[in-house]
Image (cartoon, helix red, strand yellow):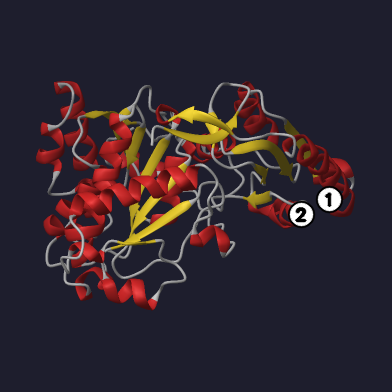
Amino acid sequence: MTEFYGYERPDGSVGVRNHLLVIAPIDCSFEPAKRIAAQVEGAVAVTQHHGCGLDEMVANTLVGVGRNPNVAGVLLVGLGCETLTSEILAEGIESTGKPVEVVVCQHEGGTLRAIERGVRILQRMAQEVAELRREPFPLSELILAVECGGSDATSGLAANPATGIAADMLIDEGGTVIISETQEMVGAQHLLARRAVSREVAEATYEMIERQERRMRAMGIDSRFMSKGNIEGGLTTIEEKSLGAIRKGGTRPIQGVLENSWRRLERPSRGGLWLQDGTGSDIPSMTHMVAAGAQIVAFTTGRGSTVGHAIAPVLKITGNPETYARMSDNMDIDASTILDGREPLRSVGERIFKAIIEVASGRKTKAEALGYRDFAVFTRSRIAEHLLGFC
């Protein structure tokens, strides 16, 4: 399979979904944003919960999500007195050429008028979007985010390495893969650095992981911390967990470390494997990779996870046979066939690669079929970063 079927956007990027995105820049206007989205098919509402001040890292993420090619049109619903305004976000999204409009509750004279106007705007966008048709595109247009959550001993043995094979296959076709969750690279930085395309990228890899270790120590968290579920699932050390976690990114050379800060949220400049400096929390980690351009997420889990995402389809992969049997409503791919000898690792990787293409071409994941539209935005503490000497 060397192509998928997607939607071309005015800026030349290609989406795998046709979402109408309603963004509330602050949670104060999220309720009317949700009510607008609920009245128009294909619309989804999102917000952030870090206050109404202008946090550039939050703004960068919301702009990036709005720019994602899975989004066909954007409606921003503001309150009117916030510092992180709809106009700031609109300016960052408009260059994509997709329709972007703004409704402000205070300017409209309250939520009833704002909702009425917002629904009319979305209805018009929906009619335009309905005329779009999928077309074939090369796999070089795909950006895959890889994520893991609820890891156990089977993750590093089956689900992650099989997903890594799929990642390699996509990269070999000219595609792009992003792997984040910096704290889950602790103990494996020397292995990642060896795969860097240059000394500068290797140094950036070491620096990214060292910064995360220092942050965790400053918060009083042992850098060797693992969750209760990880331990109960048979993982014994953070190094063991990290060695398994990085395998989901495959084996290809690392092109660079994507900056994720107040200064900018960097997008991959070419195909290949990229690291992103991100959080270890599953939902915001996915959001930040989606904001960097990922159209689809391959999510590995041993213990089991139920999450989806508001913008990108999330393909769930487990190497634990009990989890696949117990949570079949949530799991898309059973990679446990590797462990019981029914199927070789390469074959499962090829199955995952095929599923990625099918989902990119329109097949719904189980999280999508269930209507799961998880969304969260991560930001760092400026005070802590300043005290640690990082800014």
| Res. 27 in view | yes
How dense is the environment of label 1, judged by Cα within 10 Å: few (below 14), some, or many (20 and up)?
A: many
Element on which disc 2 rests: helix
Q: Which residue is mark 2?
A: 32
Q: In the rendered image, which quarter contains the N terminus?
A: top left
Q: CA distance from mark 1 to mark 2?
A: 6 Å
Q: Nearer the viewer, residue 328 or 249?
A: 328
Residue depicted at x 25% and y 46%: 164
How dense is the environment of label 2, judged by Cα within 10 Å: few (below 14), some, or many (20 and up)?
A: many
In the visual, does 311 lie left or right of 32?
left
Q: Position of residue 295 (x, y in %)?
A: 48, 40
Q: Nearer the viewer, residue 165 or 26?
A: 165
Residue depicted at x 61% and y 24%: 96
Q: Which residue is mark 1?
A: 115
Q: Position of residue 207 (x, y in %)?
A: 20, 34
Residue depicted at x 28% and y 30%: 172
Of the residues shown, which amino acid type is indicated by label 2?
A: Pro
Residue depicted at x 23% and y 61%: 155
Badge 1 vs badge 2, beta-carbon distance below 8 Å: yes
Q: Nearer the viewer, residue 226 or 121?
A: 121
Element on which disc 1 rests: helix
Q: Nearer the viewer, residue 102 or 292?
A: 292
Q: Which picture quadrant has residue 94? A: top right
Residue 56 got which mark?
none
Of the residues shown, which amino acid type is indicated by label 1?
A: Ile
